[in-house]
């Protein structure tokens, strides 16, 4: 893993202040075991009854919190971000449903199907090119009632998590904050401007009243009058889901679609947004509209409306805003890494506090899986030595059935690694499970190689 620029997994947890050096040592051992089999169950990953018992004692220990476990990883992330220079901070929330055999009352409920679970809110820090650098913020929330219920006196609004997430990153590094429509509210936009933070936020309320070039009207009407300033093609991923698990509003906002290349028009303007309440100053932002004038028959037209601090004076500047927002898909991949690559929703523990500690253990490992995939996609034609050392390349080649020659490129090395995990080339790119299983096999082979070296 050193050749990947990741270093040992212990680097992401080293220095955790748990109140006892022995607990710190146990944390490093647990992290190493979980990374060796991130998608497998605890018994398989820990490999012995004693180690498994140690894991359960660790996550049920009340002397430290989940925040204490993940704190070193956050600091490593900011170190990598400062070294990289300009970075993105991609913010989003995802719902995690608890394992069916282990209901946790503290974990609240999901409003659609009534299942127990929790919400994880994350800020994923990446380079401008989309290389993951780690998490800049991680918190959990629960739903204990209706989403429409007004907060009681003293309670914070649900939207406050976006403010906390933005502030947590902005305190340590200068980043461009990339946020989906759920984060489109006046207080957050104002807070980012006051912090002199850069941002690209997808507009969620197209009926809000705005002013553009002296004309006042709702946002939807204003942007409809913008003329295209540049055309380009963008790749759209397929969107499929189980209808019964989606609410009617979600189906309207994000309809199912086939993957395709879409030709879109892009334009922009300067807007004035009225304040959320009287007595406060209005907010001036740039708006970028991205839309598909002629979608294929039977396919929903693509349209994004983006509120941004970024310049929109030229066609190149407009396209940079679009490219920045398109990086948002990385956080969806991160959540897949947690759910599928690390099997977070299948973990069966006895309390919500213990589950939060499991999340803190798996969150940095999911980042490493995501970075592994990003290296594969961004540097597929690079020499295999960029991602693997000579021993690993030899082991990957010899473990094939039949054995093959040592891979020369990263593309070849990752495909052979995924094949060790059961991937079939005709099924498309490797998924989280096959890559994870292949990596687990490599770790076992590597352990055997080192044991053989020690015995000679």
Image (cartoon, helix red, strand yellow):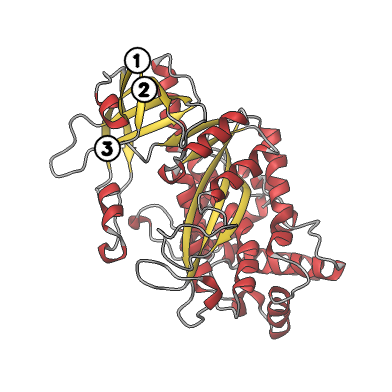
In this rendering, is residue 173 above or below 374? above
- Residue 128 in the image: x percent, y percent? 55, 32
Residue 444: image quadrant is bottom right
- Residue 424 in the image: x percent, y percent? 38, 60
Q: Is residue 158 left or right of residue 455?
A: left
Q: Which residue is mark 3?
A: 302
Give the Cα distance between marks 1 and 3. Answer: 28 Å
> In percent of the image, x 81 and y 70: which residue is there?
23
Q: Nearer the viewer, residue 23 or 196?
A: 196
User: The residue tagged with tag 1: helix, strand or loop?
Assistant: loop
User: The residue tagged with tag 3: helix, strand or loop?
Assistant: loop
> In percent of the image, x 50 and y 58: which residue is there?
151
> In percent of the image, x 44 and y 27: which residue is there?
321
Q: Nearer the viewer, residue 2 or 382?
A: 2
Which residue sits furthest front?
A: 279
Q: Nearer the viewer, residue 237 or 357?
A: 357
**Residue 394 in view, yes or no:** no
Tell me which numbered mark, 3 or 2, is placed earlier along the sequence.
2
Q: Is residue 159 left or right of residue 15?
A: left
Tell me which numbered mark, 1 or 3, is placed earlier along the sequence.
1
**Dot 1 crowding, Cα within 10 Å, few <14, some 14–19, many 20+:** few
**Dot 2 crowding, Cα within 10 Å, few <14, some 14–19, many 20+:** some
Tell me whether circle 3 and circle 2 mark residues in contact (CB < 8 Å).
no
Give the Cα distance between marks 1 and 2. Answer: 6 Å
Which residue sits furthest left?
A: 297
In this rendering, is residue 44 above or below 267? below
> In percent of the image, x 52 and y 45: which residue is there?
91
Q: Which residue is mark 1?
A: 214
- Residue 165 in the image: x percent, y percent? 59, 46
Q: Which residue is mark 2?
A: 211
Q: How many numbered marks does the figure carry?
A: 3
User: The residue tagged with tag 2: helix, strand or loop?
Assistant: strand
């Amino acid at each position: 893993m050193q050749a990947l620029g990741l270093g040992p997994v212990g680097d992401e947890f080293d220095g955790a202040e748990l109140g006892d050096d022995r607990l710190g040592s146990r944390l490093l051992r647990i992290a190493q075991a979980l990374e060796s089999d991130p998608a497998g169950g605890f018994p398989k990953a820990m490999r012995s009854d004693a180690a498994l018992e140690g894991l359960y004692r660790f996550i049920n220990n009340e002397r430290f919190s989940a925040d204490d476990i993940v704190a070193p990883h956050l600091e490593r992330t900011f170190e990598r971000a400062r070294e990289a220079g300009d970075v993105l901070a991609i913010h989003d929330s995802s719902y995690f449903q608890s394992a069916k055999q282990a209901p946790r009352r503290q974990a609240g409920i999901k409003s659609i199907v009534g299942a127990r679970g929790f919400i994880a809110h994350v800020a994923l820090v990446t380079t401008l090119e989309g290389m993951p650098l780690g998490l800049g913020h991680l918190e959990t929330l629960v739903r204990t009632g209706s989403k429409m219920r007004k907060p009681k006196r003293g309670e914070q609004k649900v939207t406050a998590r976006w403010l906390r997430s933005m502030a947590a990153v902005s305190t340590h590094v200068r980043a461009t904050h990339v946020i989906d429509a759920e984060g489109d509210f006046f207080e957050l936009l104002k807070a980012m401007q006051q912090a002199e933070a850069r941002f690209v936020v997808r507009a969620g309320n197209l009926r809000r009243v705005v002013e553009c070039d002296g004309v006042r009207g709702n946002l939807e009407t204003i942007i409809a009058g913008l003329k295209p300033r540049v055309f380009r093609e963008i790749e759209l991923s397929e969107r499929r889901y189980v209808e019964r698990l989606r609410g009617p509003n979600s189906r309207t906002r994000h309809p199912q679609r086939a993957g395709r290349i879409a030709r879109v028009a892009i334009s922009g303007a300067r807007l004035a947004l009225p304040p959320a309440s009287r007595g406060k100053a209005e907010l001036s932002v740039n708006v970028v509209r991205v839309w598909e004038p002629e979608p294929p028959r039977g396919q929903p037209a693509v349209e994004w409306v983006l509120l941004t601090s970024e310049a929109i004076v030229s066609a190149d500047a407009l396209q940079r805003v679009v490219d920045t927002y398109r990086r948002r898909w990385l956080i969806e991949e991160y959540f897949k890494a947690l759910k599928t690559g690390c099997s977070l929703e299948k973990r069966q523990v006895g309390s919500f506090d213990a589950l939060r500690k499991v999340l803190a253990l798996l969150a940095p490992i999911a980042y490493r899986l995501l970075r592994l995939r990003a290296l594969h996609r961004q540097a597929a034609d690079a020499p295999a030595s960029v991602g693997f050392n000579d021993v690993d390349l030899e082991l990957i080649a010899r473990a094939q059935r039949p054995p093959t020659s040592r891979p020369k490129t990263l593309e070849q090395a990752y495909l052979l690694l995924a094949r060790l995990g059961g991937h079939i080339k005709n099924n498309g790119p490797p998924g989280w499970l096959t890559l994870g299983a292949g990596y687990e096999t490599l770790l076992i082979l590597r352990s055997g190689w080192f044991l053989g070296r020690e015995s000679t």
